Image: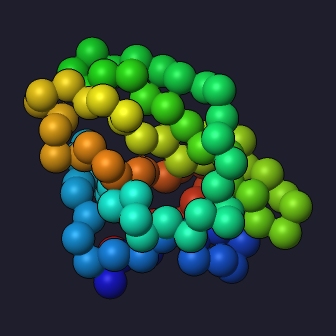
Amino acid sequence: MPRALWRGQVLAESDKVEIVEGNLYFPVETLKTEFFKDSKTTTVCPWKGTANYYDVVVDGEVNKDAAWFYREPKRAAANIAGHVAFWRGVEVEQ
């Protein structure tokens, strides 16, 4: 089952991920919310829309903007609404 890990902690785990541009997007309800803190960072993708970010925090260590999601994705990316993806050292296992 796909899962996302950082510093030995499972951040999310689900067999119902969406794959876009090689990134696995996990349903938001599968996140272990104790490891996530809202970030003010946003970026814009021309076809997906505006991305929002979470900092991942494990044992006091912060991985800034290590998770992202699209609050209101454009129609072409509707399948990732309510999903979160990872980068910046977060290990994603398939």
Residue projecting furthest to the left = 76
Relative to 40, does residue 18 appear above or below in the rendering? below
Residue under the point 84% across and 58% down: 61
Residue drawn at (26%, 43%), measured in percent from left and top?
81
Is residue 39 visible to us here? Answer: yes
What sort of colour scheme is used for the picture? rainbow
Which quadrant of the view contains residue 41?
A: top right
The x, y position of residue 43, in whole percent, is 48, 21
Relative to 51, 87 lies left or right: right
Q: Nearer the viewer, residue 56 or 72?
A: 72
Residue 3 as seen in the image, left or right of residue 56: left
Report x, y in % for residue 54: 60, 44
Q: Residue 48, how many percent across, how many down?
A: 26, 27
For image coordinates 77% across by 66% down, the residue present is 58
Q: In which image quadrant can residue 39 be found? A: top right
Relative to 93, residue 33 above or below? above
Corner quadrant of residue 1: bottom left
Q: Is residue 36 left or right of residue 94?
A: right
